[in-house]
Amino acid sequence: MKVNIKKMKYLIHLVQSKTTGTPKELAEKIAVSERMAYHYLKQLKEKSKAPIKYNSHIQSYFFSEEGNLKWEWEPEDSDN
């Protein structure tokens, strides 16, 4: 399954602001199926090691630890 970068960035924003809503609402917000929303969350948890949890009281996913999720280019050192 391919991941859309814009949708992933919006998902991260929603998780940071604790405004994802339920899984169904999250899927609607990022314009994917509920199954795909779970896939995006799994990618963040497994590939990025993001500590994401769900709080049923506030009905939102959130980062359970303080930290930063960064996507940036790191050029390799060359000795040429």
Image (spheres, rainbow, N blue to C red):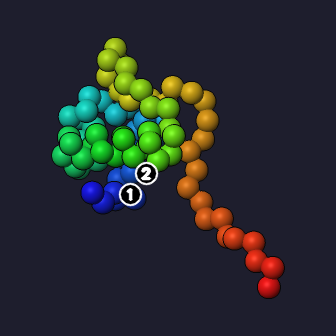
Name the image quarter holding the C terminus.
Answer: bottom right
Residue 72, given in percent of the width and then of the height, sits at 59, 60
**Regarding mark 1 in the picture, which secondary structure is present there?**
helix
Residue that badge 2 annotates: 9
| Residue 53 visible to the viewer | yes
Question: Does 29 sit above or below residue 63?
Answer: below
Name the image quarter holding the N terminus.
Answer: bottom left
Q: Are marks 2 and 1 in contact (CB under 8 Å)?
A: yes
**Residue type for callout 2:** Lys
State left or right for residue 16 relative to residue 72.
left
| Residue at the image point whose x is 25% and y is 33% from the top | 23
Relative to the observer, which residue lies in front, 78 or 10?
A: 78
**Residue type for callout 1:** Lys
Residue 38, given in percent of the width and then of the height, sits at 28, 40
Residue 75, given in percent of the width and then of the height, sits at 67, 70
Question: Does 68 sit above or below residue 57?
Answer: below
State left or right for residue 27 relative to residue 58.
left
